[in-house]
Image: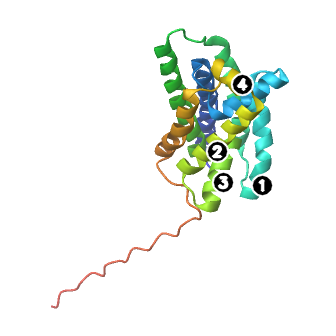
Amino acid sequence: MDLVKFGGRLAVVCLGASTTGAGLALMIRARLGAQPWDVLHLALAKLLNVSPGTVIIGVSLLVLIFWWPLRQRPGLGTLAMTILPGACCDLVLSVVPVPADLALRAALLAGGIAVFSVGTALVIRGGLGPGARDGLMTGACARWGLSVRTVRTGLELGVLILGLVLANPVQAIATGTAGPGTVAIALTLGPLIGVLLKQRIAKTPTTPTPTPTTQPQVSPS
């Protein structure tokens, strides 16, 4: 592989991984309901008395265990998505306050969804290995021929339920950890990432159909 091209792809992956962390933080700071994975992260962070970024890194390592039955292989992109999102999330949380105005919070939520989706698409497009959570998505798509929209939405709803079980649902809603924004995120991330990728991840590689060649016609002399 050309080192220049590889370096460019690695830079794109690192940018995407960092961007996803920033998107997570923006959604958390909107206080309208965090991303479903972050409902789980925030519940664990409170239980363990650690930062959200620390939990994000820990959960990433745990999720990698489930890659084996899906026959996913980690790469440099996987490493980047294990470390950078948690670190960048903590960094952005330390500098971005919670807006007082509801309209600004809604704008922050929408911006966080967009930023996170772009970051995820960049990591997958980089082709150096998806993040731990995205590996579940791409692995299920490839293994069972499902669409990105279907798998992503199913994962988001599943971890949301788990996060609410671990946390106090009433308290989660009161503090803005879960709310209408959580539902909006769960329903829009999958379709938006699918649009950004502009493709359905195929179950198996397809062999291109050879195009018949047209023989030149020779005019009789």
Mark 1 lies on residue: 68
Q: Which mark is residue 155?
A: 2
Q: For the point 53% across and 24% down, which residue is it?
A: 109
Q: Amino acid at mark 2?
A: Leu
Instruction: Give 80 or 61, whichever is nearer the viewer.
Output: 61
Tag 4, which secondary structure?
helix
Q: For the point 48% across and 69% down, which residue is it?
A: 208
Q: Give the CA distance from mark 1 to mark 4.
A: 26 Å
Rendering quarter of residue 18: top right
Label 1 vs label 4, nearer the camera:
1
Mark 3 lies on residue: 139
| Residue 71 coordinates in the image, percent (x, y) | 73, 58
Label 2 vs label 3, nearer the camera:
2
Label 1 vs label 2, nearer the camera:
2
Evaluate if marks 3 and 4 touch, with contact meaning CB atoms under 8 Å apart: no
Whichever of labels 2 and 3 marks the residue nearer the N terminus, that label is 3
Tell me if mark 2 has few (under 14), some (14-19) or many (20+) residues whose alpha carbon lies within 10 angstroms of its own. some
Label 2 vs label 4, nearer the camera:
2
Q: Amino acid at mark 3?
A: Gly
Whichever of labels 1 and 2 marks the residue nearer the N terminus, that label is 1
Whichever of labels 2 and 4 marks the residue nearer the N terminus, that label is 4
